[in-house]
Image: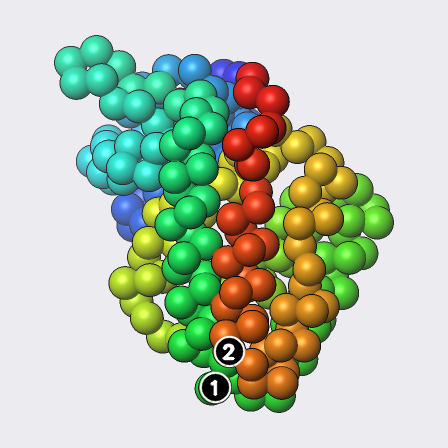
Amino acid sequence: MPIPAERSPLDRTLLRDDVLGTLRAAIIDGTLEPGEQLRDGELASWLGVSRTPVREALLELARSGLVVARPGRSTIVSTIDLRRVREARDVVASMHALAVRTAVPSLTPADIDDMRAANERFEAAIAAHDTDAALRADGELHGVPVRVCGNRVLQTVLEQFEPLIERAVRLRFGSPEGWASLSRHAEFIDHCAAGDADAAAELANETWSSLFPTDAVES
């Protein structure tokens, strides 16, 4: 779809990371559709910033696979490439397993409570057919061990590749029913609460790895 005309300009002190986050979110939620051409001047006007942070953000989005930059020609929002999504999925699954295995011995009762509360929000969102809320709650739940593990490199890898998976989930499964059964959150949280790092890490890996099976219908 065309860049929305009603967007209010953002503060001109906006950092590149803020521009990156705004553009990434617009691609993930479909505001900027697959195949749409992205012109840095138009994006800069939309966001109320100079072209420099926009260009930097587009380069970062190209690294994660959300846009395709063709030097001297154009930059477009990438289409869903299931092979690339599955490659990202496998990396993300491994990173989450590592985060969980590292974090479980350090999880506090408050961390477990946060995970259970996020799971309650996730289940409520599934019942309400609210994809946005379900994805947000799912991210909050899995984000606890990622935060607790404290591995900045791991966090950077997830920040790069998780958006590719989230966009594919949104575009291929318009409602959460298509993927909710893949999340066994309660069992996962119980393993974390019991201090069973190996079982929790294995389940985290299985949950992420089960997204987009190879026998899924290609579009």
Q: Position of residue 104 (x, y in %)?
A: 50, 80
Helix, strand or loop at mark 1 = helix
Q: Residue at x 52, y 84 (%)?
A: 107
Q: Position of residue 217 (x, y in %)?
A: 60, 22
Return the residue found at the far top: 73
Residue 64 - label: none
- Residue 94, image x, y percentages: 41, 57
The amino acid type of the residue labelled 2 equals Ala
On the question of residue 159 being in view, the answer is no
Question: Which residue carries the number 1 mark?
Answer: 105
Q: Earlier in the sequence, mark 1 or mark 2?
A: 1
User: Is the C-beta separation of discs 1 and 2 under 8 Å?
Assistant: yes
Query: In the depicted view, which residue is nearer to us: 169 or 95?
Result: 95
Q: Which residue occupies the foreground of this view, 151 or 56? A: 151
| Residue at image mark 2 | 197
Around disc 1, counting alpha carbons within 10 Å, would you say few (fewer than 14), some (14 to 19), or many (20 or more)? some
Across and down, in percent, residue 22 comes to: 43, 41
50 relative to 28 in the view: left or right: left
Image mark count: 2
Question: Which kind of residue does numbered mark 1 sit on?
Answer: Pro
Where's the C terminus, which quadrant? top right
Q: Find the residue positioned furthest to the left.
A: 72
Q: Going 39% across and 32% down the picture, which residue do you hit?
A: 84
- Please tell me which residue is depicted at 47% across the width and 28% down the height of the picture: 82
State the scheme by which the image is colored.
rainbow
Q: Nearer the viewer, mark 1 or mark 2?
A: 2
Cα distance between the residues tagged 1 and 2: 7 Å
Residue 120 as seen in the image, left or right of residue 88: right
